[in-house]
C-alpha cells in the first residue's frame, strides 16, 4: 500500500476519542495524516494526543502560520481522503449548507478528494428532520457516510447515533487508500 495524504477532521462529541485509534492505524500504515480539530473537539480530546500520534500538531486555527496560503488551501492540495469523525450535527449542517464558517467547514468546501463522514449524536438529534435533511443533502453531494450505529450512547441509552467503531471506519475508507 503506498503512502496517502489523509486529513482527519475531528469535531466535538464524546466519540472524538475513537478518532485517535483511526489516526494511529493510518500513521502505522505509513500514511501522511493531518488532523483538524474544531473548537468543540478540543473539549473532548487533547491536541497533544494527535501531535504525538501524527508527529505534527493538529490544526485548530484557520490562520495557522505553518500554512502561508491558509490550511484550508494547503491541506486540501493533493489530499487523497478527508474523514470527519465524529461529525457533529453542527458540522453536518455547516457542510451541507456550504457555510465555510470554521476551518473544517471551509476545508470541506476546498476538498476535491473523496469525503467520508462518521456522524455521532444522540438518538433524538439523529432523528430530527433537520439532521436527516442535512445527511441526505451531503449524500446527494457525494459524501460517503459510515454509520451511525445502534448501541450504547453516552447519554446512557441504547439507540441509534453511536459512531461506528474505528475498525468499521478504516474498512469503509480502505478503498480510497489502496
Ligand atoms: C458531553 C457532551 C457530548 C456531546 N456529544 C455530541 C455528539 O455526540 N454529537 C453532536 O452533534 N453534538 C454533541 N455535543 C454538542 C456539541 O459538542 C456542540 O454542539 C458543539 O458546539 C459542537 O461543536 P463543533 O461541531 O464545532 O465540534 C455534545 C456536548 C456535550 C457537552
Image: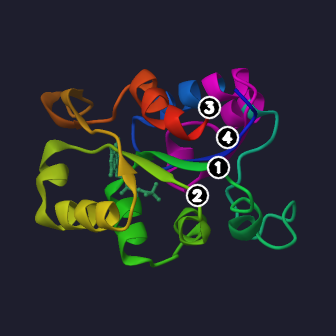
Q: Is mark 2 within 8 Å of ligand 1?
A: no
Question: Which callout, 1 or 4, points at the residue further toward the start of the chain?
Answer: 4
Q: Position of residue 127 (x, y in %)?
A: 12, 53
The residue pinned by badge 3 equals 23
Q: Is residue 19 left or right of residue 153?
A: right
Could you say whether the residue bearing mark 2 is in a helix, strand or loop? loop
Distance between mark 3 and mark 2 Cα atoms = 18 Å
Q: Is residue 75 left or right of residue 87?
A: right
Could you say whether the residue bearing mark 4 is in a helix, strand or loop? helix
Could you say whether the residue bearing mark 3 is in a helix, strand or loop? helix
Q: 10 Å neighbourhood of mark 4: few (<14), some, or many (≥20)? A: some
Query: In the figure, 140 relative to 6: above or below?
Result: below
Give me the disc on residue 113: 2
Q: Is residue 128 left or right of residue 99?
A: left
- Residue 107 in view: yes
Q: Nearer the viewer, mark 4 or mark 3?
A: 3
Q: Quadrant of residue 107?
A: bottom right
Q: Nearer the viewer, mark 1 or mark 3?
A: 1
Q: Position of residue 130 (x, y in %)?
A: 18, 67
Question: Which callout, 4 or 2, points at the residue further toward the start of the chain?
Answer: 4
On the rendered image, what quadrant is the C terminus found in?
top right
The residue pinned by badge 4 equals 47
Q: Are marks 2 and 1 in contact (CB under 8 Å)?
A: yes
Distance between mark 1 and mark 4 Cα atoms = 23 Å
Q: Is mark 3 within 8 Å of ligand 1?
A: no
Query: In the figure, 39 relative to 69: above or below?
Result: above
Q: Nearer the viewer, mark 3 or mark 2?
A: 2
Distance between mark 2 and mark 1 Cα atoms = 5 Å
Amino acid at each position: 500500500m503506498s503512502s496517502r495524504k489523509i486529513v482527519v477532521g475531528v469535531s466535538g462529541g464524546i466519540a472524538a476519542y475513537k478518532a485517535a485509534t483511526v489516526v494511529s492505524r493510518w500513521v502505522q500504515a505509513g500514511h501522511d495524516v493531518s488532523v483538524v480539530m474544531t473548537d468543540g473537539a478540543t473539549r473532548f480530546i487533547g491536541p497533544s494526543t494527535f501531535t504525538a500520534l501524527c508527529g505534527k500538531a493538529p490544526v485548530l486555527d484557520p490562520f495557522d502560520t505553518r500554512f502561508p496560503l491558509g490550511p484550508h488551501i494547503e491541506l486540501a492540495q493533493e489530499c487523497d481522503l478527508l474523514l470527519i469523525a465524529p461529525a457533529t450535527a453542527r458540522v453536518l449542517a455547516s457542510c451541507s449548507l456550504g457555510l465555510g464558517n470554521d476551518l473544517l467547514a471551509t476545508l470541506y468546501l476546498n476538498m476535491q478528494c473523496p469525503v467520508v463522514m462518521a456522524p455521532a449524536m444522540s438518538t433524538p438529534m439523529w432523528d430530527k428532520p433537520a439532521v436527516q435533511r442535512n445527511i441526505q443533502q451531503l449524500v446527494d453531494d457525494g459524501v460517503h457516510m459510515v454509520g451511525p450505529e445502534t448501541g450504547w450512547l453516552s447519554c446512557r441509552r441504547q439507540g441509534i447515533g453511536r459512531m461506528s467503531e474505528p475498525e468499521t471506519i478504516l474498512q469503509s475508507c480502505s478503498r480510497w487508500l489502496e
